[in-house]
Image: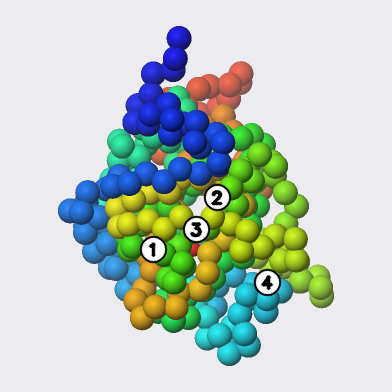
């Protein structure tokens, strides 16, 4: 018997299985998106950090020296800890239900991350898998990009290497030639942004992709900020062994947390 789906059609589930990503239109209504954008702007003004962004030799390949010096990324992790609106967003049933259709029946929030690309100099992203930032053993992990602005290639929409999730996890460049650490990325000579599919989207849309899907984005060349928030979700039984937020239990946004043999309850102090 066919699996009963919560939010997606069988065709959408198949598209994700084949391509490693899925574009969902209008997941958040214009009113919901306005509220999220307003809260995000408050967070950007109050808590977020503007920095040169990701490090590594890829910067010299993607940007000329002047742009590279000026390039900035505004980022903040775990927005749901700072505004109720973003707490609602991570549990939003049309989104959580769609994720349950792809990796469920049980879905745990792993993190939220803001990436705002400032006008003109907003940071491009080199080709990478998100798996390299939060390494887990299994397949059941998706990232969802919530769009607060319309995107296209000129302001740096997400670009995905079609079907690349089927390669599994890949070794990333994680250090510079002098041995110092850099942000994980794939070698620029073998993995090219030009080979990816642009996925332009509208405010309120969500682009979901598998954490093994190779992706990146171009610099923001417009005179307006491009705001996007990534929400990472996993099957609570997909065990993390390295990276961001390792060992931190998240909210259950769909289903239940199964108990494995001998598993202890979470401590109440840290
Ligand atoms: O914000 C972007 O353009 C790229 C985002 C990205 O690569 C990611 O969230 O992993």
Q: Which residue is pictured at 32% across the width and 73% down the height?
A: 45
CA gap, disc 2 and disc 3: 29 Å
Mark 4 vs 3, N-terminal side: 4
Q: Is residue 165 above or below residue 176?
A: above
Could you say which is closer to the camera, residue 52 or residue 71? 71
CA gap, disc 2 and disc 4: 25 Å
Count of numbered marks: 4
Residue 58 — which label? 4
CA gap, disc 1 and disc 2: 28 Å
Q: Count neighbours of disc 3 (C-alpha within 10 A) and say few if under 14, some if 14 to 19, many if 20 or more.
A: many
Q: Is mark 1 within 8 Å of ligand 1?
A: no
Circles 1 and 3, Cβ within 8 Å, touching? The answer is no
Residue 1 — which label? none
Q: Is residue 255 above or below residue 240?
A: above
Mark 4 vs 1, N-terminal side: 4
Q: Position of residue 100 (x, y in %)?
A: 43, 30
Q: Is residue 198 above or below residue 63?
A: above
Residue 151 — which label? 1
Residue that carries the numbered disc 3 in the rendered image: 198
In this image, 169 relative to 98: left or right?
Answer: right
- Residue 131 in sight in this render: yes
In which quadrant will I find the N terminus? top left
> Given the current orientation, which residue lies at the most extreme bottom position?
66
Q: Position of residue 63 (x, y in %)?
A: 61, 80
Residue 245 — which label? 2
Circles 2 and 3, Cβ within 8 Å, touching? The answer is no
> Which quarter of the figure has residue 186?
bottom right
How is colour applied across the structure in the image?
Answer: rainbow
């Amino acid at each position: 018997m066919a699996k009963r789906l919560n939010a997606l059609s069988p065709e959408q589930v198949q598209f994700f299985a084949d391509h490693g990503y899925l574009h969902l239109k209008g997941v958040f209504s214009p009113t919901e998106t306005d509220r999220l954008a307003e809260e995000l702007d408050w967070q950007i003004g109050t808590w977020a950090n503007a920095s040169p962004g990701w490090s590594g030799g890829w910067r010299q390949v993607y940007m000329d020296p002047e742009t590279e010096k000026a390039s900035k990324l505004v980022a903040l992790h775990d927005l749901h800890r700072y505004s109720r609106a973003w707490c609602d967003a991570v549990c939003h049933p049309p989104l959580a239900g769609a994720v349950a259709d792809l990796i469920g029946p049980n879905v745990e929030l792993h993190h939220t991350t803001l990436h705002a690309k400032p006008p003109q100099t907003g940071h491009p992203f080199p080709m990478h898998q998100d798996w390299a930032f939060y390494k887990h053993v299994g397949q059941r992990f998706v990232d969802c990009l919530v769009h607060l602005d319309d995107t296209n290639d000129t302001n740096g929409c997400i670009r995905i290497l079609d079907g690349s999730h089927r390669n599994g996890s890949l070794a990333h460049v994680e250090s510079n030639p002098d041995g110092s650490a850099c942000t994980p990325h794939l070698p620029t000579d073998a993995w090219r942004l030009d080979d990816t599919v642009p996925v332009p989207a509208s405010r309120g849309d969500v682009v979901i992709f598998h954490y093994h899907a190779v992706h990146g984005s171009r610099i923001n060349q417009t005179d307006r900020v491009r705001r996007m928030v990534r929400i990472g979700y996993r099957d609570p039984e997909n065990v993390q062994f390295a990276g961001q937020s390792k060992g931190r239990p998240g909210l259950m946004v769909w289903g239940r947390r199964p108990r494995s043999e001998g598993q202890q309850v979470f401590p109440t102090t840290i």
